[in-house]
Structures are given as C-alpha cells and as structure tokens.
Amino acid sequence: MTYLRTQAIARIVLDNVPNIQASWVTMGPKIGQVALTFGANDFGSLMMEENVVSAAGTTWRMTLPRCSGSSPTRATCRASGARTTA
C-alpha cells in the first residue's frame, strides 16, 4: 500500500524529524496500527474539528480505547502515552 510505503521511506529519508505520525483518522485504525511498524512513532490523536477529514469522505468516526489492553498501540507491544499542550 502506498501509505505504508510512504511511512517507511519517510522514516529513512527524514532522519532529522523525530516524530512521524500514523493517521488512524484518515486511514482507519488497523492501517494506523500497522504504520507503527513501518516507521511511525506517533499514533495521532482525537481531532477537535473533523470538518476537513469528513469532507474528504472518511468513515472512521469512532473512539479508540485509551491505554487499555485492546488499544492499537498495546497490540504492537509499544508503550502509549499522552501529550500535554501547556
């Protein structure tokens, strides 16, 4: 898939960029999860305004479990955390 290939190439080429985000909102939770093994190290977050994403025709309007045993980051054996915007 082109999206996953782009994630992997970005990790190799953009070695000066510390964080590459996997967008589960636009690609769906399963592809977002796989992207964590293709070089992404940020699973993204909730969007306050979904206007742009919904206008693009996405159907991923859902809430993912936060830091639970079934969360997508746990399934890839990665630690999850929350950002602060202080």
Image (cartoon, rainbow, N blue to C red):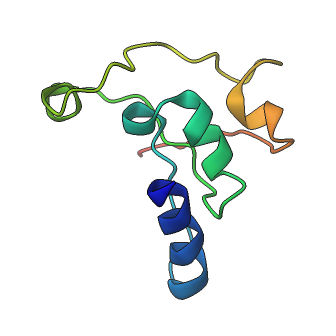
Q: Is residue 74 left or right of residue 57?
A: right
In the rendered view, tell whether residue 71 sits above or below residue 36: above
Using the rendered image of the protein, determine whether residue 15 is visible from the camera's viewpoint. Answer: no
Q: Give percent across and percent down for residue 49.
A: 21, 27
The structure residue drawn at horizontal position 80% and vertical position 32%, both measured from the top left corner, is 74
Residue at 42%, 45% in the rendered image: 85
- Which residue lies most toward the front here? 1
Q: Is residue 15 left or right of residue 73?
A: left
Number of numbered discs on residues: 0
Residue 77 in sight: yes
| Residue furthest right in the image | 77
Along the line of sight, which residue is nearer the eye, 2 or 58? 2
Residue 26: quarter of image: top left
How far from the left and from the top, in percent, is residue 2? 46, 59
Q: Is residue 49 above or below residue 61?
A: below
Q: Residue at x 58, y 51 (%)?
A: 42
Q: Position of residue 73 (x, y in %)?
A: 72, 36
Residue 80 vs residue 75, the one in the foreground: 75
